[in-house]
Amino acid sequence: MCRRCARLWSFRTSVLIPSDLHWSITLPVRVTPLIDPEHRPSSRRLVWLASDSAGNPVGSAFLRLFTSPGQAHLAELELHVHPAERRTGTGSRLLDAAVSAARVDGRRALLAQAEAGSPGDRFLAARGFRRKLTLTYARLALADVDLAMITEFAGRRPPGYRLSTWDGVVPDELADTFAASRRAMDDMPMGEVDYGTVSWEVDRVRAAARAIAERGDLLHTVVAVDESDGSIVGFTELVVPGDGTGDGRHYGTGVLPEHRGHGLGRWMKAEAIRQARGRYPELGGLLTDVADDNQHMRAVNDALGYIPTHQTIEYQLDLAPRR
């Protein structure tokens, strides 16, 4: 599925010997391209594995190349190095391989994310990436949820609207209007990140739902319907692990601009929480994340009882084409 760049790297490191002698030895680190079995309808992925002289894996890099027309300029990096191998050049070599591949593929922007204050945060900042966005992650512990409050919010039906729900792939009779409602995310506050534009046709909506099912997870969707014409005007999606344990994750909540101001976002999300609480008694919690400048959704999460857990920084590296 992926094009690969085959390059071998080596680096020098110093080892402290108990006799207080410092020997400098050469340890070869091999960066090997791998075949990635993952398939997504709107992207492909390149993978590299860094291994030491004994063949032990010490780091990895995943480069996602988006393929939809509105995001063909964009690549996203996920890079990991074993803690014992940091500050030895392994991360830089993996980064070089990924940046080179992104440039060869004609990408102009490379995104990467790191938890605030982490080694990854410092690594990206030191290598030319620029901070573009701060995301706050939050969790709702279902065992501690105020069920009476959630039920009250879910029962506050704004005049002229009703809720509809389904599991997995959108029903055929709702597919067109559900795909059209995805434009609710077009003006979502996302700082200065060059995400481009995403066009959600029916086929893409269905493919995304099938991909979640194929990996063994469960997708639940709650939508707000305009009773005047039966069109979907807002949605919230929740993905639950297939065994119903651990934590579920909110994938997106949006309301079309012309229908905002009626409390639809909180209404839909409260119903999703209420259903999760009733259907999955062993589910631990629900996870969500929101950009710091998305004041409305932050207020919704606060009202529903989500507790912030940590922040991540979205970085961007602007790529000049290789000459």
Image (spheres, grey):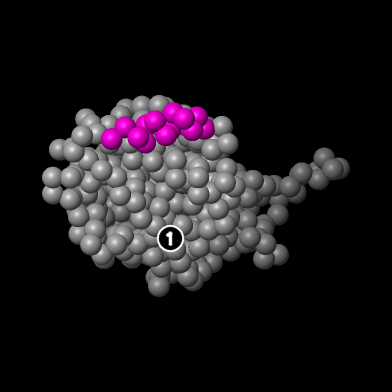
Residue range of the region highlighted in magenta in the rendering: 145-157
User: At 41% from the left edge and 68% from the top edge, which residue is drawn?
Assistant: 39
Task: Please indicate whether residue 285 sits to the left or right of residue 228 in the image.
Answer: right
- Above or below, 20 against 174 in this view is above
Image coordinates for residue 311, horizontal then vertical, percent? 47, 33
User: At 46% from the left edge and 36% from the top edge, which residue is drawn?
Assistant: 137
Task: Please indicate whether residue 191 sits to the left or right of residue 217 in the image.
Answer: left
Front-most of 241 and 65? 241
User: At 29% from the left edge and 62% from the top edge, which residue is drawn?
Assistant: 171
Q: Would you name the residue on which mark 1 appears?
A: 212
- Tag 1: residue type? Ile
Residue 101 visible, this orientation: no
Image coordinates for residue 59, horizontal then vertical, percent? 58, 55
- Above or below, 215 against 151 in this view is below
* Count of numbered tags: 1
Q: Quadrant of residue 28?
A: bottom right
